Image (cartoon, rainbow, N blue to C red):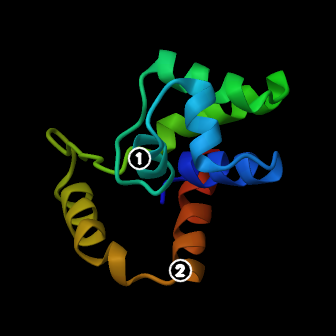
Amino acid sequence: MTPLGCELRKIRSAHGLSLKDHAARVGISASYLSALENGRRGVPTHTTLRRIIAALGVAPAEEQRLCTLVKLSDPNIIVNTTGLSPLATELANRLAEKIGDLTESELEEYLWMLQSAKN
């Protein structure tokens, strides 16, 4: 599941919408919406995302937050380390190799470290 998919499902459920009803409001298939929520599909186009969000009737701040999550929700991410140090390439490869074995706590710790490094 992606951050975007997780949030869409949470909001949809909070609004009491079934997957089928939400998909019908948007004009997409329930299978596509399910795949999007579960991270089996890449991020939607901007137009499709806007339609999905509009069908939920969320406030503008929530809409903006969902649009921001798109950047963090590509389940098929590619890390290009061309021109970076050997350490950067090693880190990217080790992360790709081990990410499935990390616990939620470890993932949170790594995310915290990365977010702290931005400052």
The quadrant in which residue 105 appears is bottom right
Rendered location of residue 79, percent (x, y): 25, 47
State the mark number for residue 85.
none
Dot 2 corresponds to which residue?
A: 106
Three-letter amino acid code at the position of disc 2: Glu
Numbered-mark total: 2
Dot 1 corresponds to which residue?
A: 31
Which of the two residues, 16 or 10, is positioned nearer the viewer here? Answer: 16
Q: Can you say whether 73 is above or below 94 in the image?
A: above
Residue placed at 62% from the left, 63% from the top? 112
Mark 2 nearby-residue class (10 Å; few <14, some 14–19, many ≥20): few
Three-letter amino acid code at the position of disc 1: Ser
Residue placed at 63% from the left, 55% from the top? 116
| Disc 2/disc 1 C-alpha distance (Å) | 32 Å
Which of the two residues, 66 or 80, is positioned nearer the viewer here? Answer: 66
Question: Could you say whether the residue bearing mark 1 is in a helix, strand or loop?
Answer: helix
Q: Is residue 51 left or right of residue 47?
A: right
Q: Is residue 89 left or right of residue 46?
A: left
The quadrant in which residue 10 appears is bottom right
Question: Could you say whether the residue bearing mark 2 is in a helix, strand or loop?
Answer: helix
Which of the two residues, 35 or 17, is positioned nearer the viewer here? Answer: 17
Rendered location of residue 8, percent (x, y): 64, 45
Q: Can you say whether 70 is above or below 35 in the image?
A: above
In the picture as drawn, the residue positioned furthest to the right comes out as 59
The quadrant in which residue 101 appears is bottom left
Residue placed at 20% from the left, 65% from the top? 93
